[in-house]
Image (cartoon, coloured by chain):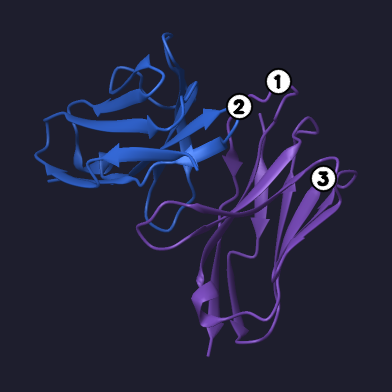
Chain colours: A purple, B blue
Amino acid sequence: GENVEQHPSTLSVQEGDSAVIKCTYSDSASNYFPWYKQELGKRPQLIIDIRSNVGEKKDQRIAVTLNKTAKHFSLHITETQPEDSAVYFCAASIKNSGGSNYKLTFGKGTLLTVNP
Amino acid sequence: GAVVSQHPSWVICKSGTSVKIECRSLDFQATTMFWYRQFPKQSLMLMATSNEGSKATYEQGVEKDKFLINHASLTLSTLTVTSAHPEDSSFYICNGEDRVFGYTFGSGTRLTVV
């Protein structure tokens, strides 16, 4: 089955700096890679996702890059703010052409702390 | 957008009792419901996958007789933790899937077994 590795497990940055979180996956059939932000005791919130036919996607201060050959993808947050502090999870799954999704396999998470 | 309503949001029960958690998909039909468990400071671990009208598929190491999943309709899926023990204390969260909206998480249930 799919195995998703995520690094680092903790990341502390100063407000305004950039933060990068990296993930690798094992199943070459995976073609959908979402990133979630989870605050304590709450549900994961989708912040950005990328499909395997795209190498990069950006949404304001957040961007995701994907290297299919190397089977790794990264989350980039620029101009970090204290409210970005949370646990971030990467995930991988297979989305087939009919639209049905397979199970999401999550990385172990990264605790991001943005210091004011 | 799609919403999955999950209840209860928290529950405290005595050891040996059973607890039922409900997830209802609002404004969409969840053809598949994934059930996850999350221990403190850990990731979301998939417990089982259920499709409407069929038996759930459990992940390795998850006892199907202990964690009963029912997905009787496209809008309702339930997880029953039977004979709960303190080690079952965790955050349980459902994740509904449909072809239009993709994945939608419920709000989670904090279970504490005393």
According to the picture, the residue beneath numbered tag 3 turns out to be A71
Across and down, in percent, residue A33 comes to 70, 45
Q: Nearer the viewer, residue A21 or A42?
A: A42
Q: Nearer the viewer, mark 1 or mark 3?
A: 1
The amino acid pointed to by label 2 is Arg
According to the picture, the residue beneath numbered tag 1 turns out to be A98
According to the picture, the residue beneath numbered tag 2 turns out to be B99
The amino acid pointed to by label 3 is Lys
Q: Nearer the viewer, residue A5 or A75?
A: A75
Chain letter of the residue beneath label 1 in the structure image: A
Give the left or right position of residue A11, taking residue A31 as reference.
left
Distance from Cα at disc 1 to Cα at disc 2? 8 Å
Give the left or right position of residue A19, taking residue B6 as reference.
right
The amino acid pointed to by label 1 is Gly
Across and down, in percent, residue A89 comes to 57, 54
Classify residue B98 by image quadrant. Answer: top right
Say the numbered circle drawn on residue B100. Answer: none
**Residue at the far right in the pictured view:** A69
Q: Which residue is painted at 48% across and 45% down in the image?
A: B44
Judged from the image, the secondary structure of the residue bearing numbered disc 2 is loop
Judged from the image, the secondary structure of the residue bearing numbered disc 3 is loop
Chain letter of the residue beneath label 2 in the structure image: B
Classify residue A12 by image quadrant. Answer: bottom right
Distance from Cα at disc 1 to Cα at disc 3? 24 Å
Q: Which residue is painted at 60% across and 31% down in the image?
A: B100
Judged from the image, the secondary structure of the residue bearing numbered disc 1 is loop
Distance from Cα at disc 3 to Cα at disc 2? 25 Å
